[in-house]
């Protein structure tokens, strides 16, 4: 007869210090959190055949097996179980060892009991998420996006699959223009040939001509050998010209000639070369405006603007932010060879509400920072970079300090006037301001506004009625 499956029990506290176990027992019992305590690591390991903990909290230095050795045993048998390591030895070596071993969090003694309980709750949330979230199959998609604006981009790539047409990709910096260009190439009849990319804004004007068209030996000082340019390197394939709006005027003329008659000359050369190349250009600038200003050739603009793809900014596709963040966190973990971090619902909601001036690239950089720097495996709002949270170096100059002082002045003024019942009207004004701004941020979408505020939709609707807030609905 088979043995019954182990039962998912509770939070396990492992410490040889009786007083620490007593503190946890009282605190967790008060919060209604099921728990068990052990005085030694081996006692806990012996119990694993009968029970499986949801979260483990272990001292790092104990007689017998240490907390780090215990964590290693747990990771071997229950790799998804969060382990919180606590120690009175708050030194760098212990912290690094704990995190390298895969600790969920590092809790130095003495600790604040409420903070410890909050940490346990976060670990329990992570444990549940580990069960709910399927493991990624490791297959990396080309471009991610479920937002309607991104679906339009995907449909356009599909329609262009068998085309050789010139494409102009527009969008803010960091929206993924080169990714789209590579996807267009990969799904085109030229997929078997080279994809060559060049950022025309990153190369000095004096060198850009040679980079694009190549040069003959002796064409200029230092040209000791013949060099093939990007057009020749991309023969039969695709040439991606990024930041085309910054191309110097004289090179715009040469590029127009190539697009018009399919021929070009190397610098210092006299023999015309044929260019069988599909050109995909990209820019974050308003090319129509640059044409009007005389900074970009109108005839070149029309040559490039055969088919235009506009990539949406992150603020236009907020529903994609949670998926993108999870993808970039997993990618950073794979690249660095470490255990992946996960965002709490509050952190995801916070990131989804940001404007993302740097778009997808900025989000990817943030996820890399989080993978390296954030404490613990589950990342909350307070674990995000200070600049993302909008914190200044001086607390006195912080936005939080400003509004708190303004509120304190208002309270003092009302009390000085002899007013009573001050709390109710100020609370109503405060709630009204929160709701009005949240609705404005979401364009009147109540469900999204309620999520950002951390309240239920029914609560939001009731508050709107009670506070007599005018909405679009």
Image (tube, rainbow, N blue to C red):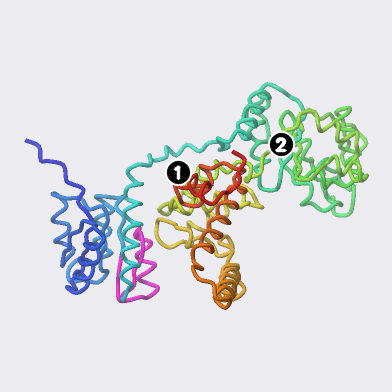
Asked if residue 90 lies in the magenta stretch, the reply is yes
Q: What is the residue that sits farthest to the top in this orientation?
A: 162
Task: Work out whether 224 lies above or below 311.
Answer: below
View extreme (bottom): residue = 416
Q: Residue visible at 31% across and 64% down?
A: 117
Residue in the picture at 63% in, 25% down? 158
Of the 4 image quadrants, the one containing the C terminus is top right
Which quarter shows the N terminus?
top left
The residue located at (55%, 35%) in the rendering is 146
Which region shows up in magenta?
85-109
Can you see residue 331?
no
Q: Is residue 141 left or right of residue 185?
A: left
**Alpha carbons under labels 1 and 2: distance apart:** 37 Å
Q: Which mark is drawn over residue 458?
A: 1
**Of 50 and 414, the residue lying toward us:** 414
Is-magenta flag for residue 286?
A: no
* Left or right relative to 397: residue 461: left
Q: Secondary structure at mark 1?
A: helix
Which residue is disc 2 drawn over?
Answer: 310
Q: Nearer the viewer, residue 44 or 252?
A: 44
The spot of residue 361 in percent (x, y) is 62, 49
Asked which quadrant contains residue 387, the reply is bottom right
Question: Mark 2: which secondary structure?
Answer: strand
- Residue 365 seen by the camera: yes
Whichever of labels 1 and 2 marks the residue nearer the N terminus, that label is: 2
């Amino acid at each position: 007869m088979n043995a019954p499956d182990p039962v998912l029990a509770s939070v396990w506290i492992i410490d040889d210090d009786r007083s620490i176990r007593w503190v946890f027992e009282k605190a967790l019992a008060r919060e209604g959190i099921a728990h068990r305590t052990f005085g030694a690591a081996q006692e806990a390991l012996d119990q694993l055949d009968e029970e499986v903990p949801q979260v483990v909290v272990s001292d790092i230095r104990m007689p017998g097996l240490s907390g780090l050795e215990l964590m290693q045993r747990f990771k071997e048998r229950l790799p998804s179980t969060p382990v919180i390591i606590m120690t009175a030895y708050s030194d760098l070596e212990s912290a690094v060892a704990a995190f390298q071993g895969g600790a969920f969090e590092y809790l130095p003694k003495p600790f604040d009991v409420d903070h410890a309980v909050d940490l346990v709750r976060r670990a329990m949330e992570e444990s549940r998420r580990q069960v709910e979230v399927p493991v990624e199959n490791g297959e990396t998609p080309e471009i991610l996006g479920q937002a309607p604006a991104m679906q339009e981009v995907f449909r356009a790539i599909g329609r262009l699959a068998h085309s050789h047409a010139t494409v102009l990709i527009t969008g803010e910096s960091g929206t993924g223009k080169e990714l789209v260009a590579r996807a267009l190439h990969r799904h085109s009849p030229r997929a078997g040939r080279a994809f060559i990319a060049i950022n025309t804004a990153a190369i000095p004007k004096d060198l850009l001509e040679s980079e694009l068209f190549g040069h003959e030996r002796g064409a200029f000082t230092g040209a000791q050998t013949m060099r093939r340019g990007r057009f020749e390197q991309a023969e039969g394939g695709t040439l991606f010209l990024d930041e085309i709006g910054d191309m110097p005027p004289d090179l715009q003329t040469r590029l127009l000639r190539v697009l018009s008659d399919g021929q070009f000359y190397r610098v210092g050369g006299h023999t015309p070369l044929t260019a069988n190349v599909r050109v995909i250009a990209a820019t974050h600038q308003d090319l129509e405006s640059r044409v009007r200003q005389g900074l970009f050739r109108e005839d070149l603009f029309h040559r490039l603007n055969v088919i235009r793809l506009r990539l949406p900014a992150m603020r236009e596709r907020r529903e994609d932010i949670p998926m993108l963040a999870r993808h970039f966190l997993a990618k950073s973990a794979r690249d660095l060879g470490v255990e992946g971090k996960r965002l709490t619902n509050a952190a995801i909601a916070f990131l989804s509400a940001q404007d993302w001036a740097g778009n997808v690239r900025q989000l990817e950089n943030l996820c890399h920072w989080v993978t390296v720097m954030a404490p613990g495996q589950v990342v909350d709002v307070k674990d995000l970079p200070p600049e993302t949270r909008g914190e200044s170096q001086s607390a006195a100059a912080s936005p939080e300090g400003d509004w708190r002082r303004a509120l304190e002045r208002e309270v003092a003024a009302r009390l000085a006037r002899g007013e009573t019942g001050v709390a109710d009207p100020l609370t109503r004004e405060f709630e009204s301001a929160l709701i009005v701004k949240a609705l404005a941020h979401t364009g009147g979408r109540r469900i999204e506004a309620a999520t950002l505020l951390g309240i239920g939709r029914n609560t939001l609707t009731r508050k709107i009625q009670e506070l007599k807030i005018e909405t679009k609905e």
